[in-house]
Amino acid sequence: MKIIDAHAHLWLKQDTVVDGLPIRTLDNGRSLFMGEVRQMLPPFMTDGVNSAEVFLSNMDYAQVSAAVITQEFIDGIQNDYLAEVARCHPSRFLVCGMCEFRRPGFLPHARELLDGGFRAIKIPAQRLLLPEGRVMLTSDEMMQMFHLMEERGAILSIDLADGALQVGEMQEVIQECPRLKVAIGHFGMVTRQGWHEQVKLARHANVMIESGGITWLFNDEFYPFHGAIRAIREASDLVGMDKLMWGSDYPRTITAITYRMSYDFVTKSRELSPEEKALFLGENARRFYGFTHLVELPYIKNMSE
């Protein structure tokens, strides 16, 4: 079974502002995060650099063949670094470009990203509920970008606000651009009321759900995340297992668990069949994102074994 991570992050340095509050890389894996110090990375990542090389080491150890690198405003826009990552490791990473969607005028930048070789664009849509006014996913500029992406065969990776708040907008986008491939993140914000409405968007032909952050959302119950397994089963009952993809939300989630633990709670579950596990952990993402020539990674025994 080849495993693909459909939701991970990379950055060289956090240095940005969200909702008027600073986010800055500190030392020992910590960041100043919107008014408080948070453990953003494992403490052994002392320089705060969340690099492709360190992630590849984690991927090789955990036998993860490839990963989709998304973006989030809290990390700052990382297009330059991610373009370099894609050039250096084309078989291991598919990277998402990101624009400054919180202000008008982003369409030329989106076109530039697509012209430059980005195969996907990320929208952290939960960050578009601004105090000065909500940025609508159905605005003229957004719709122009979605039509452009549909024409180019680019993928939209999007995280929505809790519940059904933005589901109606996404319905309009999907109906207007039926050939646009869409990956909805954070498993529809599972654990929040109304998450099923986000999952049901995957009843449309070109829409998928990825589970980036599911271990964060079920952090209170912790490993082996029985609630997350039940949620995967619920989502499968709604849209089918062939519409669901595993994502880790690396590296933030591995401050609490190891990278392997972010998926092996699925492999060890007795509630999912081997065929369902293979679809969820890799086959669906391989088909949706178009990964080819996936690397074969041997299991390396730990010294404690």
Image (cartoon, rainbow, N blue to C red):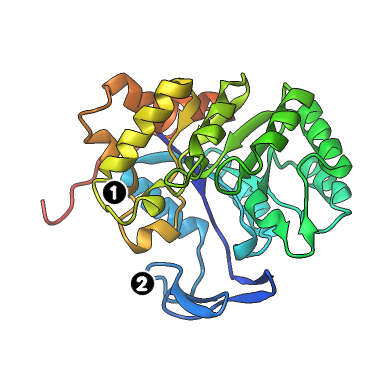
Kindly identify which residue carries mark 2. Answer: 44
The image quadrant of residue 3 is top left
The total of numbered circles placed on residues is: 2
Q: Nearer the viewer, mark 2 or mark 1?
A: 1
Decide which of 79, 87 is in the foreground and name it: 79
Give SS at disc 2. Answer: loop
CA gap, disc 2 and disc 1: 18 Å
Mark 1 falls on what kind of element?
helix
Residue 5 against residue 218 in the figure, above or below: above
In terms of image quadrants, where is residue 144?
top right
- In x, y percent, where is residue 181? 66, 28
Q: Is residue 29 left or right of residue 111?
A: left
Q: Is residue 69 above or below residue 235?
A: below
**Residue at x 41%, y 24% (from the top left corner):** 236
Q: Earlier in the sequence, mark 2 or mark 1?
A: 2
State whether residue 1 appears in this view: no
Q: Is residue 105 above or below residue 267?
A: below
Q: Badge 2, how many Cα within 10 Å: few under 14, some, many 20+?
A: few
Q: Which mark is residue 261?
A: 1
Location of residue 220 in the rendering, given as x and y in whole percent from the top left corner: 31, 56
Residue 49 visible in the snapshot: yes
298 or 212, nearer to the observer: 212
